[in-house]
Structure formats: C-alpha cells, structure tokens
Amino acid sequence: MAELHIAIKPETLFHIGGLPISNTLFTSFVITAVLLVFLAAAGSTLKKTDRPTGIQNFLEMVVESLVAFIESIAGKTARAVTFTPLIAGFFVFVLLNNWADLLPGFDTIRYTGEPGVKLVQVPNIPGISKVFAETTTEEVIETVQQDNAPVSATVEEEHAPEEQNRGVAIFRGANTDINMTLALALISVIATQYFGLRFQKAGYLKKYFDFSGPIQFFVGLLEILSEISKILSYAFRLFGNIFAGQVLLAVMGFLIPVLLPSPFYGLEIFVGFIQALVFSMLSLVYFNMAAESHHG
Amino acid sequence: MDNLPSALAIGLGALGPGIAIGLIGKAALDATGRNPEASGKIQTAMILGLAFAEAVAIYALVIALLLKFV
C-alpha cells in the first residue's frame, strides 16, 4: 500500500566543520553558484553598443524592468539607487529558488548512504514519497556519481519511521524550508531599520520611542510589535505558498500521476513569480517608508 | 474524526480570505470599468492586494498541514 509522507523539517545532507548543511541550503548554494557563473560568463562578453543582442539583450531587459519597477515605487531618487541591489537580489533569488523547485529531480534523487545514488519513483516534492512497503520498485543507478558535494563530509541519512530506508533527498526547494524564509524575512526587516537610520539618522528612533504623550508612547511600542509581526508574515507567506504548493503537487501526483499535477505546475510557476514579486515589492515599500521622513 | 482539527483549520481559515479576494477582484473590475486607461496600475495593485489576502489563507493552511502531518 502506498503512503504519502510529508516532512516539514529539512533533512541534513552533510556537515561542514560542525555545521549541518540541509538539502534546502545545499540547493540554494547550487542555484546561487549557477547564477553567479552564468552572470560572470555573460558579463565578460558585454559590448558597449546601442543594439545589444543575445544574452546581453536579455540581461539588459531584466535590469531595465527591475529598475523601472523600483523607480515606480521609490521614485527616481538616490534612495532608489541604494535600494536596488538588495531588492533585485531578493527578487532574483526568491524567483529562481521558487522556479527551480519545479524542475525534475528535486526530491526524487535521494541518497541512502549506499553506493551510488538511488533514484526513487516518487512524486516531485519535498520530503514526500510514495513508499511501496512490500516490494521495492526503486532502481539503483550505479553509474550516477554523487560528485556534487565539494567538501569532504560524513553523509547523514535520515531513517524514515518505517523500515524502508527512503534516503535523503539531495535537492529540495530552498523556500520550502521555514529557516530560509525566516532568514530572508530577518534580512528584510533589519535592512529596513538600517535604511531608516541611515536616511533619517537618529530621528528614525522617534517612530518607536515617542515621549510626547502617553498615547504616542504606546503607539511607539505597537510599532515595535508590528515590526516583529512583519518578520513572521514575510516568513510564513513565502514558506506557506511554496511549501503548500509542493504538498498540492504531491497530493495531486498521488491521486492521478501525470495528468492531474499538470495544471498545478502552471499554477506553481505563476505563484512562484508572484511571491517573489510580493516579497520584493513589500520590502521596497517598507524601505521607502523608513527612508522618507514621517509626517505622522 | 481524526482529521477534524486540520479540516476545520483550513475550512474556516479560508472563509475570510475567500470573501476578501472576491471583494478585491470586484473593486479592481469596477475601477477598470470606470477608467480603462489606468488598467495597468489597477492590475498591479490588485495582484499585490490578492497576495496579501491569500497569505492569510496560507497561514491557515500551514496550521492545517502541521496538525495533520507533524
């Protein structure tokens, strides 16, 4: 009888020094490395011309649309130039991680500690697999080398609660991990405070500690609370959308394998893009509000 | 009966956002009907509003998943 397993917690792949590296973190490393290599290679072939072609054309289109998007909210100010790297970074990072999660191989290629890499017949989702309890229908691929772990490490395997060793997925979408989204949320909120202090100097603290009256003081404390709730809302919005999307794909794949998940892949592509857009747009709006002087 | 808590979590949790999303769509359509030239800006604001409303439903879904699978 096939079962459906969903693991919210990411599994550890290996350790670097004393730090455990989970499969989501490893996936984000791989995606960042791919992005950097691509950009470095494309950047070395840039030509100064009025009619760009090929990759340069595509990259210029991406940069121009990001800049237009940022300027539409922050205006054509020096602030917008300061915000652009972080906001564009958020957008591209979240977008690529969301979309990469839909590629084949994510969460289907698993490592069980046995030689070779085990390819398990599973739906394409984090921590979810169909476990065929009596017969093993998994195929062990002997020739596939696991050459994607550049550091020497001990490989940990997570033993599933039941007898069969399903192994650990090597790739799992980075934003299906609440740790990753929480980290992004913390970066965004701390950057908000940083930009507020930088553009408004010490006057920014008057938003939180306003001693001109008892009600204003209380409102200042509520503002502190709302910053904390922003962290939670960023983290859970991104995590919930991506993780629930993956669970949806798992359940659909569990019911009718190829046909039923297909329209949901389209939905997931759209949702991945929208969540990247919302995360960066919201960060931009809060940065902008923090940097402008408040008029109450 | 075992799954009742998670069923209630997502079922009741999706009521509010469902209504909210409908209202946002209605407002966007009304605005576009009045002023078709501004439809680009209206669409952007609508998508943003939809993402926030949907986020609340997603919070409820996360709780439902936690209850069921953890």
Image (cartoon, coloured by chain):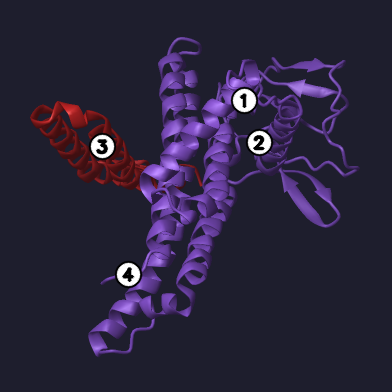
Chain colours: A purple, B red
Is A74 situated left or right of A130 in this image? left
Mark with earlier residue (2, 4)? 2
Task: Give the chain of mark 3.
Answer: B
Q: Between residues A120 and B51, which one lies in front from this camera angle?
A: B51
Which residue appears at 77% of the width and 30% of the height?
Answer: A111
Q: CA distance from mark 3 to mark 4?
A: 26 Å
Residue holding disc 1:
A131
Q: Position of residue A198 (x, y in %)?
A: 52, 69
Residue holding disc 2:
A162
Q: CA distance from mark 2 to mark 4?
A: 58 Å
Task: Tell me whether marks 2 and 1 sit on the same chain.
Answer: yes
Q: CA distance from mark 3 to mark 1?
A: 42 Å
Which residue appears at 83% of the width and 33% of the height?
Answer: A113
Question: Outermost residue toward the top?
Answer: A259
The numbered dot on residue A197 is none
Q: Are marks 2 and 1 in contact (CB under 8 Å)?
A: yes
Q: Secondary structure at mark 4?
A: loop
The answer to whether residue A4 is visible is no
Which residue appears at 42% of the width and 78% of the height?
Answer: A203
